[in-house]
Amino acid sequence: MTLTADSTIADILKEKPEAADVLFRFGMGCIGCALANGETLRQAAMGHGIPLDELLAALDMTE
């Protein structure tokens, strides 16, 4: 599966469990909440005020 900014948090965590540490570092502490199942990384970044390009780089993903 190719992960992008439009992948859900849940899908990212399934494919890259180590992404949890990165998300926590960016202040996304609720990665296990119900929103993670349907919220994309792009939506989460916008909701938390995190620059998407920085988050993608930290996760070693591209847009």
Image (tube, rainbow, N blue to C red):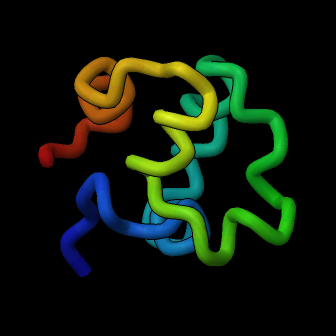
- Position of the N terminus, as image quadrant, is bottom left
Q: Residue at x 83, y 45 (%)?
A: 30
Q: Position of residue 3 (x, y in %)?
A: 27, 64
Q: Residue at x 38, y 27 (%)?
A: 55
Q: Residue 11 location in percent, x, y?
A: 50, 73
Q: Is residue 58 left or right of residue 12?
A: left
Taking the image as shown, residue 15 lies to the left or right of residue 58, namely right
Seen in the picture, residue 27 relative to 45 is either above or below; the reply is above
Residue 4 is left or right of residue 63, and the answer is right
Q: Is residue 2 above or below residue 44?
A: below
Q: Which residue appears at 81% of the width and 35% of the height?
A: 29
Q: Viewed as shown, does residue 37 lie left or right of 6? A: right
Q: Where does residue 19 sit, x and y in percent of width and height?
A: 53, 44
Extreme-left residue of the structure = 63
Residue lying at the far bottom of the rendered structure:
1
Q: Is residue 53 above or below residue 61?
A: above
Q: Residue at x 48, y 21 (%)?
A: 50
Q: Percent from the top left, x then y, of residue 10?
A: 60, 70
Seen in the picture, residue 24 relative to 2 is either above or below; the reply is above
Name the quadrant containing residue 39. bottom right
Task: Please give the count of numbered marks on the rendered protein.
Answer: 0
